[in-house]
Image (spheres, rainbow, N blue to C red):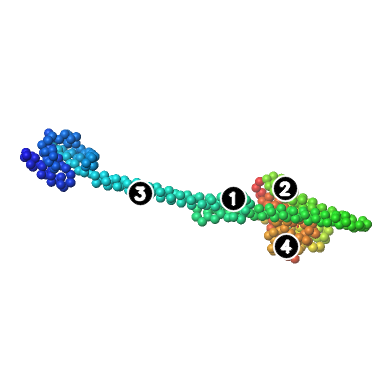
Amino acid sequence: MSEAKMYVNPIAEKYSKDINGRVIVVDKSGIVKGDSNKEFLGETFRHKEIQNALNGQTSTNTFKFKEYGHVLYVAVPAIVQNRVVGATLLSISINDIYKDVNHIKLNLFFISIVCILLIALISFIFSGFAIMPLERFTKVINSMAKGDFKQRVEVNTNDEFKNMAYAFNAMIMKLDQVDKQRKEFVANVSHELRTPISSIKLLSESLLHQDEDDINIYKEFMMDIAAESDRLNNIIDELLSLVDLDKEKLHLNYKITYINFLLEKIVNRLKPLAEKKDIKLKLYLNEKIQIKVDSDKIQQAIINIIENAIKYTQEGGEVKVSLYSQGKWCIIEVRDNGIGIPENGLTHIFDRFYRIDKARSRKTGGTGLGLSIANQIVALHQGNIEVESKIGKGSVFYIKIPNDIKL
Ligand code: ADP
């Protein structure tokens, strides 16, 4: 064994134990001077990594051998005074590292699968939460389509769905109310129309079945029949004007009108009616007021209210009509000292067909539509009607119309 080998080999062997790998040391010609396995001592080693190291470059590579598995080769040049005098090749088994990497890869694969499943589950749950309120809306909409307006949408979240549910429920309540009013209206109309028709039928049948020679009895019955027919006519006329008002929202015939002249005209027209009951009908025109109104419609509203004042005031009573302005309002006040309206009736008198005393109102020819028509006309003029009343003392109706109607 040469001197170099004697010196180099034990170091190679010792170092090989330290790193648990093989150490091969070659001189600049590639002849093996040290081999921890003593296998290639003295042989020329032409391994690619060693060649690179002898050319001054550190090089690494990994190989897979059938018997050893994965091995890492590292070849390092030995440089003395800037000259390559040899090279060292370390070969270390990296099977453990590969095993670890594979293990980590497998773990990562399982973790990824678990994560994907978790994400899928969470998305499913959250999408369920998001869809749940929509399902509730759909359910309620479906029951509404079947005519059930009693259902409400319940949303317990604290987001836009909650606001939407509030708005939606308010809309159903309104629809429910409108639906009830519509049903009530149809029921009322049928009832109101049926009453005079039944009377006419009853009266005519009585006439048919009696052998009466007295012409006066016939006349009396025929007068009742004529009165019932008038009543029927009144109801139909008023119903038609209500329908017209519903349609006419957009095309009212606005014209600048002197309310003073209009009131004079109305009062003159109603005076005979008041005189029949010995009622004093007085007009107080405190100011000259001219505003934009549909004079035919407004006239109808005012007449309905003054006629009521006359109708519901005892003989010898008094009805005062006054005109004045208050801020932006033109006010027509109709004050009577008649029978008055009970407090619980005040909120209903503008409802269609509502009458405080049905029997009395029928006698006076009332249909229960007059105030509803008046109210609708004034509302179309962007105004309103207010009432104050005391039973037994009388009532005051304030017709308020703005003097700056926005067209
Ligand atoms: P009607 O055709 O029965 O008069 P309205 O709609 O004009 O119907 O009025 C509704 C109800 O309001 C009347 O039936 C009556 O009971 C009550 N009413 C209206 N105006 C007066 C009034 N000036 N004084 C007392 N009650 C009134």
Q: Where is residue 284 in the image (x, y as percent from the top left)?
A: 75, 57
Identify the secondary structure beneath mark 3: helix
Q: Residue 142 carries which label?
A: 1
Cβ of mark 4 under 8 Å from ligand 1: the answer is: yes
State yes or no: discs 4 and 2 in contact (Cβ < 8 Å).
no
State yes or no: discs 1 and 4 in contact (Cβ < 8 Å).
no
Name the residue rendered at 22%, 39% in the picture. 65
Residue pointed to by mark 4: 341
Residue type at numbered disc 3: Ile
Cβ of mark 1 under 8 Å from ligand 1: the answer is: no
- Cα distance in 3D space between marks 4 and 2: 29 Å
Left or right side of 5 for 391:
right
Residue type at numbered disc 1: Asn
Identify the secondary structure beneath mark 4: loop
- Cα distance in 3D space between marks 1 and 2: 33 Å
Left or right side of 213 for 6:
left
Q: Position of residue 171 (x, y in %)?
A: 60, 52
Residue pointed to by mark 3: 111
Identify the secondary structure beneath mark 1: helix
Q: Which of marks 1 and 2 is in front?
A: 1
Specify whether residue 164 is in view.
no
Q: Which mark is residue 244?
A: 2
- Cα distance in 3D space between marks 3 and 4: 81 Å
Q: Residue 188 carries which label?
A: none
Disc 1 or 2, which lies upstream in sequence? 1
Q: How many marks?
A: 4
Foreground pick, 298 / 21: 21
Name the residue rendered at 18%, 46% in the picture. 20
* Label 3 crowd (10 A; few <14 / some 14-19 / many >=20): few
